Image: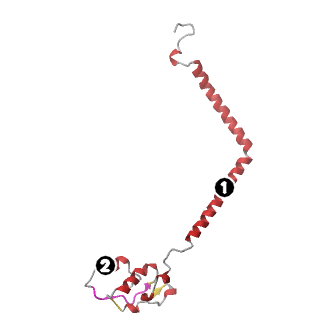
Amino acid sequence: NSLGVLRNGTLAQFRSLPALRRVVLGRNTWVCDCAIEDLVAWLKESDQVEGKEALTCAYPDKMLGKALLKINGSDLNCSVPVDVPSQLQTSYVFLGIVLALIGAIFLLVLYLNRKGIKKWMHNIRDACRDHMEGYHYRYEINADPRLTNLSSNSDV
């Protein structure tokens, strides 16, 4: 057969079969990476595997020929790298620098264009004032819409 690794589900099935007395796993190209940890643990506790001392790694090159029973967790480097928090910290520092630079450029553009922005704001204010004055006079003159058809001389 051409097995490279046996997953935990398969190993659980092997454990659940007490009638299974003999498992032959020789002549396979075992890939000795993090996925093989379950197989190694099962091999160390199981009596079902025939010739388990002869099982060796075929991949990667640094593990070539190493017996599966002699593999431990430190050989596989499966733990989370210790420098991940420093990488994240570095990326947050870089993000902060980039955002600060963008903010500084934005403020510089606003400062350099302050006269144009002031003129634009005055134009908008004047336009709003003119527009609102029309509403103001209309409501002041005709404060009560029920009185719009009455003359000024009528007795109300």
80 on left or right of 69: right
Q: Amino acid at mark 1?
A: Ile
Residue at label 2? 13
Query: Magenta includes 118?
Result: no
Quadrant for residue 25, please give it.
Answer: bottom left
- Could you say where residue 133 lies in the image, as x and y percent from the top left? 63, 26
- Could you say where residue 122 lies in the image, as x and y percent from the top left? 70, 36
| In contact (CB < 8 Å): disc 2 and disc 1 | no
Residue at disc 1, secondary structure: helix
Q: 10 or 84: which is nearer to us? A: 84
- For label 1, count other residues whose C-alpha is less than 10 Å away and answer few (under 14), some (14-19) or many (20+): few
- Residue occupying image coordinates x 65% and y 30%: 129
Would you place residue 111 above or below residue 83 in this image? above
- For label 2, count other residues whose C-alpha is less than 10 Å away and answer few (under 14), some (14-19) or many (20+): few
Q: Quadrant of the N terminus?
A: bottom left
- Could you say where residue 19 lies in the image, as x and y percent from the top left? 25, 85
Residue at label 1? 102
Q: 2 or 9: which is nearer to us? A: 9
First to last magenta residue range: 20-30
Alpha-carbon distance for marks 2 and 1?
58 Å
Q: Amino acid at mark 2?
A: Gln
- Residue occupying image coordinates x 50% and y 80%: 77
Between discs 2 and 1, the one toward the N terminus: 2
